[in-house]
Amino acid sequence: MIKNILIMNTGTGWGGLEAWFYKTAAALQKRNYNIFILAQSDSEFYNKSIEQGFNVTGIEHIGDGTFLNPFRIHFLVNYLKNNSIDAMFLAQSSHFKYGSIAGKIAGTEKIIYRRAIAKPIKNKFYNRLFLKYFITDFMSISKITRDMNLKDIPEGVLDKSKQKLVYKGVKKDNFLNPELKSDIRREYKIKDNELILVNIGRLCRQKAQQYLIEALPKIIKKHQNFKVLFVGKLGGKENEYLERAKELEIEDKIIFTGFRNDIPSILKQADFMVHTAIYEGGSPWVILEAMMAGLPIVSTEAITIPEFVQDGVNGYIAENKNPDDIAAKVIKMIENKERAKLGQESAKIAADKYTFKKMIDNIEEKIFEQKLN
């Protein structure tokens, strides 16, 4: 029976992977698993893990060549044996190579490689070796991610029985009926007859908010009663976007809120989401959160998105980097008199497939092979 779980992560920042590891480990801890952490000392993940009461040990960064270092392998093998680790989660490519060798030598029952980025694994002999003989579970967060990961890996290398689909999960109660921490209309002087369109994500190349800005003049030709909230960490891009908005004479339609910690409250007050990313690694939190909050969504296709936003079912899919098509889909959403039904379908899909509880249940059932009541 799986009891002692190791999570290895030597990233120094705090991003989606660190958040997933932390939340997942905390949930498993509540289900009486013992959580062990190997992380870089004084990283945010390291410090938060100590605060949470995990068994934390500091280690040096794990790089692409670490799996060739016999001293590092020897350390991890001893660590796994001394702590009776039953299962280990590996995420980055470097950790996969290093951890799968040590786990195999130590006889660890479950060696889990979780991939959350939709890029092919290189068809190297050692990757084929580790996938075929060392890891026990290949955990994907979407079907498209899995298919992209294995695109270059020959058929038969990774047995189908090892391929486990475990979608990311959102805490349902946080988004269904959240506490309204602020009145967005009053705070940003948005009129009652104006729709609130929300775009959530740091202002950066990947999220590509410029394509929504370029789409606005075309939308305004048909509809004027709306505001677009750009919610996310500011990093300089907002100045570029504001300048372009002034050139297009649409600056009165956009609001940059900066970072906010009341996303559920904002989603509850918005009419629909517009997501313009040019690529997404797996299943973006903001899409799942918007769905759970019951919002219809206009999104660019961005590789994995059509697995979550189904065109005409809970939103509309626009062509990547195409302001004309983004504008057309936003107009279509504004004019849809049954827009609320798309939002209801979003909430229904999310409640059925993308709750945090379901994700943890799936890890226990599909990965740890535990039977739940």
Image: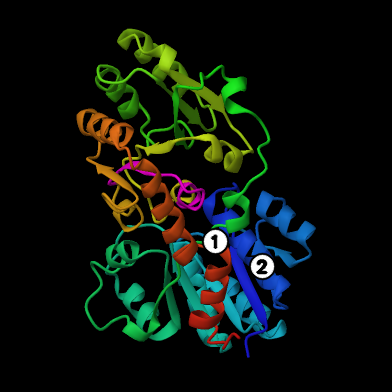
Residue 136 placement (x, y as % from top left): 45, 83
Tell me the CA gap for discs 2 and 1. Answer: 26 Å
- Identify the image quadrant of residue 5: bottom right
Residue 292 placement (x, y as % from top left): 50, 53
Looking at the picture, which amino acid does disc 2 mark? Ala
Residue 133 placement (x, y as % from top left): 39, 86
Looking at the picture, which amino acid does disc 1 mark? Ile
- Identify the image quadrant of residue 249: top left
Quarter of the picture holding the N terminus: bottom right
Q: Residue 159: tell me if it is visible.
A: no
Q: Is residue 27 above or below residue 200?
A: below
Mark 1 residue element: loop
Q: Tell me the residue at 21%/33% (across/down).
A: 325
Give the left or right position of residue 215, taking residue 346 as reference.
left
Q: Tell me the residue at 25%/20% (across/down).
A: 222
User: Which mark, residue 27?
Assistant: 2
The stretch in magenta equals 288-301
Q: Which residue is mark 1?
A: 62
Q: Is residue 141 above or below residue 102?
A: above
Q: Nearer the viewer, residue 324 or 243?
A: 324
Q: Tell me the residue at 51%/65% (across/down).
A: 66
Q: Nearer the viewer, residue 110 or 316?
A: 316
Specify whether residue 291 is painted magenta: yes
Give the left or right position of residue 11, taking residue 92 as reference.
right
Q: Is residue 136 above or below residue 19?
A: below
